Image (cartoon, rainbow, N blue to C red):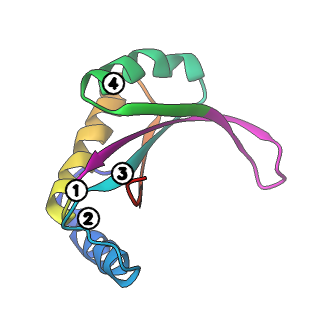
Amino acid sequence: MYTGESSQNEALQFSFSEIRKAGWNPDGDLLWGYFFIDNDPQKFDALRIRLEQMGFTFVDVSELEDEYDQPSGEHMLHVEKVETHGPLSLAKRNVEFTDLALEFGIRAYDGWDVGLVP
């Protein structure tokens, strides 16, 4: 859970150095994906609406698998948005989404991934 911006600094600095090593420019727009986890996929409905109002694009809700490749009963909401982030702004986004998960009764904001803009 992302509860403070400063606690993420070291990990995000490393992540951004890895993005640069991959040949991507984190100083420009990239496609950022964000993930929320809950056992009740219906709880994502209201959160999805809020995220879309904030300019995020819905990707999907999927059921996660356990270590035996069986349905786990946990579901993941995936949204994405083309944005430019640095470690500080991404830390702020992580705290914002942790707070949003709490507001909507979602078990967890599970983090982010990043890719090139298609």
Residue at screen point 82% across, 50% down: 69
Q: Which residue is mark 1?
A: 91
> What residue is pinned by disc 4?
52
Under tag 1, what secondary structure? helix
Q: Label 4's element? A: helix
Answer left or right for 30 relative to 7.
right
For the residues labelled 1 and 2, the Cα–Cα distance comes to 6 Å
**3 or 4: tag closer to the N-terminus:** 3
Q: Residue at x 41, y 48 (%)?
A: 33
**Distance of mark 3 from mark 4, alpha carbons?**
14 Å
Q: CA distance from mark 1 to mark 3?
A: 13 Å
| Label 1: few (<14), some (14–19) or many (≥20) C-alpha neighbours in 10 Å | many
Residue 107 highlighted magenta (yes or no): no
Using the numbered discs, state the Cα–Cα distance from disc 4 to disc 1 in whole angstroms: 21 Å
- Looking at marks 4 and 1 on the same chain, the residue that comes earlier in the sequence is marked by 4
Q: Which residue is mark 3?
A: 32
Q: Nearer the viewer, mark 4 or mark 1?
A: 4
Marks 2,4: beta carbons within 8 A: no
- Circles 1 and 3 in contact, beta carbons < 8 Å: no
